[in-house]
Image (cartoon, rainbow, N blue to C red):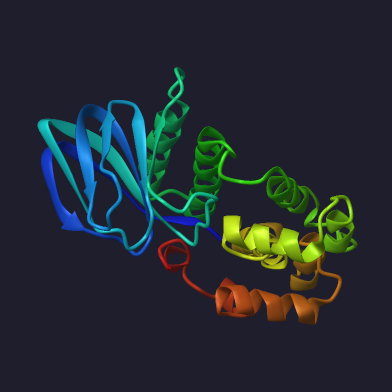
């Protein structure tokens, strides 16, 4: 499940030395302009106010400006967007990305009740907006349709990927290979990650809503609690019960 594990601000800055992150990095320029130079052969990205640069994990880069820049920057763990290389986006006239990032920065750096759930919600909102702005040019139509079908129907225990494959005049193997090429994981893995991501949100609020684990399993599309537990541990590394016992700060600051 994607999660923002850090968000901060740079006041007027002229140079950020060579570095890389273990996570995706999102940089929103709030003032000034600059150039991000990469050391893997990729073209440099020139950016200006109200633009966003998104940089993949383990990508060595610098950030330089002659006039200085200000920005909001964040890192996101466990994110698998459709694009694989660094990209540049522009915010819309309403500055939706900026407004959401500003709120997220405030809540991330404040002691507020239910902070973990709030950060999860902001993560989902920010990444959905960015994905929408990035468009689906990098993804085939059938890949996007399968991903959307999974997102819309993951809670249905009778949902069948084979039924989805059958709606296309293409072989199952070809669709699966294309999905892996463009999304980085198979359709079944995408389905399981989507289901377990929702389960994590429900488990985080377990003390509030008093759901039983078998009820959470059913709400996430699993008719078998034992199978749910196996898939949950495979995706997260811990069992559902163990997950509820992890301190909340660790849940949204861990890789």
Residue 83 appears at what percent x and percent y?
Answer: 49, 49
Going 59% across and 39% down the picture, which residue do you hit? 136
Residue 206 visible in the displayed image: no
Q: Nearer the viewer, residue 70 or 218?
A: 70
Query: Is residue 88 shown above or below 183?
Result: above
Tell which of 94 and 142 is nearer to you. 142
Give the quadrant of residue 31.
Answer: top left
The quadrant where residue 208 appears: bottom right
Who's the residue at 83% across and 57% down the image? 165
Determine the residue positioned at 55% across, 47% down: 124
Q: In the image, what residue occupies the spot 76% across and 66% down?
A: 173
**Residue closest to the eye, 62 or 137:** 137
Q: Name, please, the residue furthest toward the top.
A: 93
Left or right: residue 222 compared with residue 74: right
Q: Where residue 29 sits: x, y (%)?
A: 28, 33
Q: Does residue 133 appear left or right of residue 108 in this picture? A: right
Q: Toward the viewer: 137 or 174?
A: 174
- Report the quarter where the N terminus lies: bottom right
Above or below, 28 relative to 210:
above
Q: State the image coordinates of residue 223 (x, y, percent, origin top left).
A: 86, 71
Q: Quadrant of residue 238?
A: bottom right
Quadrant that contains the C terminus? bottom left
């Amino acid at each position: 499940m994607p999660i923002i594990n850090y968000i901060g601000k740079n006041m007027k800055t002229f140079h950020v030395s060579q570095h890389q992150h273990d996570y995706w990095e999102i940089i929103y320029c709030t003032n000034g302009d600059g150039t991000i130079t990469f050391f893997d052969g990729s073209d440099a990205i020139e950016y200006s106010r109200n633009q966003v640069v998104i940089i993949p994990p383990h990508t060595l880069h610098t950030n330089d400006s002659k006039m200085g820049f200000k920005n909001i920057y964040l890192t996101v763990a466990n994110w698998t967007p459709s694009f694989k290389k660094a990209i540049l986006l522009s915010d819309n006239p309403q500055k939706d990305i900026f407004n959401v990032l500003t709120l997220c920065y405030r809540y991330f750096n404040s002691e507020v009740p239910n902070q973990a759930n709030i950060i999860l919600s902001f993560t989902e909102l920010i990444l959905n907006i960015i994905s929408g702005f990035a468009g689906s040019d990098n993804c085939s139509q059938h890949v996007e349709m399968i991903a959307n079908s999974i997102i819309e129907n993951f809670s249905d225990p009778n949902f069948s990927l084979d039924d989805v494959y059958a709606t296309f005049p293409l072989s199952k193997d070809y669709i699966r290979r294309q999905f892996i090429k463009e999304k980085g994981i198979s359709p079944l893995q995408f389905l399981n990650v989507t289901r377990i991501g929702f389960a994590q949100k429900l488990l985080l609020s377990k003390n509030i809503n008093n759901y039983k684990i078998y009820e959470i399993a059913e709400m996430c599309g699993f008719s078998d609690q034992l199978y749910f537990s196996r898939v949950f541990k495979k995706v997260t590394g811990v069992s559902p019960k163990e997950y509820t016992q992890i301190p909340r700060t660790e849940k949204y600051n861990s890789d």
